[in-house]
Image (spheres, rainbow, N blue to C red):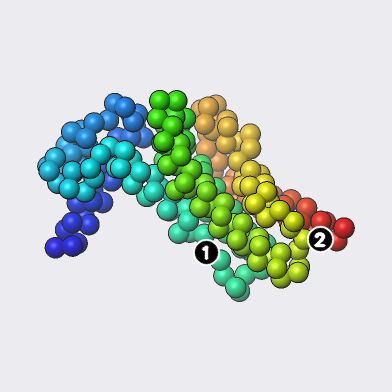
Amino acid sequence: MSEIIESKRHAIVQAATQLFLTHNYRSVSMDKIAHAAPVSKATLYNHFTSKNELFAAVVSEICTSLLQTITLSEDDDAEQTLQKIAASFVDLLYSADGLAMYRLVIAESHEFPELGQMVYDNGARLALTQLENYLQQLQNSGCFNISDTRFAADAFFSLLKGDLHFRCLLGIQAAPTEAEKIALCESATTFYLRGILHAAQS
């Protein structure tokens, strides 16, 4: 029975994701989501009491895909770990859903500022905290000198976004290919570690 319930919930979230990203938050009704799922309105409201709650689930689902792929292994050195974090972040950041979600939230945030907060709390903030905690481990190991781990975490992710992400959002640049994403992650990680090591030696 629980598998059926979970299957229904998954179908609702998937249908809502496509509708929200294809259209916009305001033009998507709960009726349209129920029809696309397809489930009855009663079933829909049994899982989600409001469109806001359902949108939060959509955001969480997309962002969780990033956090689940960020794995920190004790067998990896700092460069390998940061490469893995970078690859996970870039995959989500430049995915069709990632770009569409970003555009959606920016478009709707004036009237619905809670949507922006939702995206930040479920995605960016969690990823930033996870990286910050890892950088704190590096600091505690004595191999690196990272005086402000929060700023350092933000700086790493910023290297992976920059002008490229802005151009992709504007639609004047195609999303990077797999080869281009690998090159971006390698360049950003090398540049970043060079800065940290320089600070440690100063």
Provide residue 46's location: percent of width, then percent of height.
17, 48
Q: Looking at the image, which is closer to me, 99 or 177?
A: 99
Provide residue 167's location: percent of width, then percent of height.
57, 30
Asked which quadrant contains residue 68, the reply is: bottom left
User: Badge 2: few (under 14), some or many (20 or more) residues near its Cα, within 10 Å?
Assistant: some
Q: Looking at the image, which is closer to me, 11 or 147?
A: 147
Q: Looking at the image, which is closer to me, 10 or 152?
A: 152
Q: Which residue is mark 1?
A: 71
Q: Residue at x 60, y 41 (%)?
A: 161
In the orientation shown, which residue stands out farthest toward the right? Answer: 202
Q: Which residue is mark 2?
A: 200
Q: Tell me: 112 left or right of 51.
A: right
Provide residue 43's location: percent of width, then percent of height.
14, 46
How far apart are labels 1 and 2 at the CA level?
25 Å
- Judge whether residue 98 can be spotted in this image: no
Q: Residue at x 53, y 27 (%)?
A: 170
At numbered mark 1, what does the secondary structure look like: helix, strand or loop? loop
Q: Tell me: 88 left or right of 3.
A: right
- Judge whether residue 191 can be spotted in this image: yes
- Residue type marked 2: Ala
Q: Is residue 33 above or below residue 77?
A: above
